[in-house]
Amino acid sequence: DTEVTQTPKHLVMGMTNKKSLKCEQHMGHRAMYWYKQKAKKPPELMFVYSYEKLSINESVPSRFSPECPNSSLLNLHLHALQPEDSALYLCASSQYRDAEQYFGPGTRLTVT
Amino acid sequence: AQSVTQLDSQVPVFEEAPVELRCNYSSSVSVYLFWYVQYPNQGLQLLLKYLSGSTLVESINGFEAEFNKSQTSFHLRKPSVHISDTAEYFCAVSDNYGGSQGNLIFGKGTKLSVKP
């Protein structure tokens, strides 16, 4: 099973809202990732967790706050977003940091 | 820094014709190479990977890619495409050691459009 699940599939939020994106994998992978993908562009790395510790934060604004409650779950907390943050947010996982990554279906976020 | 170049942003092709999507990377050190496919409104699916060993890697749906170290290329090929192969294809590279170990660097993508 190489499935990564993400909820919700779609999210519309105002600039003053607080919401969270969720990602889950049950493959025993020890590395998990958040990416942001704008239309017709490749994914851009936002955060990397390795063994439940944040190892990379690619200069992402503080209105995005990641959390890794356990080895299977990854959250992305959103607060005071801007319309330019509208994008597809992808979660991925890999067995270790240098193994191939498996992606979830994404959450389509629209900020109004 | 690593970089990946996908030479064609769009490739239109007729059904049952062969296709090649080109990918070149910049690193001269040891790397891992991947092709991902993204269908409309979906996430990325791993199509195939080169980690080590045989330089020719194959996927279950007829795609293959060949790692060419001297030309720093990892081109994707399929001898006969189907309508269902219409999608965006991303080539990606990662270092297999060092501080950026495992970070995927993506090319800009190639939109494959298969016409009947």
Image: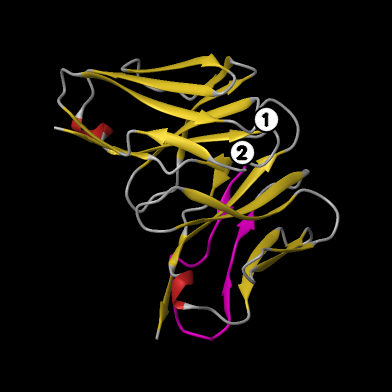
Query: Left or right: where does residue A83 sit relative to residue B23?
Result: left
Task: Provide residue A79's location: percent of width, then percent of height.
Answer: 26, 17
Q: Which residues are magenta?
A: B1-25
Above or below residue A32? Residue B112 is below
Q: Which image quarter is the N terminus of chain B in?
A: top right
Q: Residue at x 18, y 19 (%)?
A: A17
Q: Nearer the viewer, residue A69 or B29?
A: A69
Query: Left or right: where does residue A11 sit relative to residue B7?
Result: left
Three-letter code, disc 2: Ala
> Disc 1 sits on a residue from what chain?
A
Q: Residues within 10 Å of mark 2 (few under 14, many from 20)?
A: few
Mark 2 vs mark 1: in front? 1
On whether residue B20 falls in the magenta region, the answer is yes
Task: Provide residue A72's location: percent of width, then percent of height.
Answer: 56, 23
Task: Provide residue B41's location: percent of width, then percent of height.
Answer: 35, 52
- Residue assigned mark 1: A97
- Residue assigned mark 2: B1
Q: Secondary structure at mark 1?
A: loop
Q: Which image quarter is the C terminus of chain B in?
A: bottom left
Q: Nearer the viewer, residue B16 or B22?
A: B16
Query: Left or right: where does residue A44 sit relative to residue A86?
Result: right
Three-letter code, disc 1: Arg
Q: Are marks 2 and 1 on the same chain?
A: no
Gap in angstroms between the C-alphas marked 2 and 1: 18 Å
Callouts 2 and 1 close, C-beta under 8 Å: no
Q: Secondary structure at mark 2?
A: loop
Q: Residues within 10 Å of mark 1 (few under 14, many from 20)?
A: many
> Disc 2 sits on a residue from what chain?
B
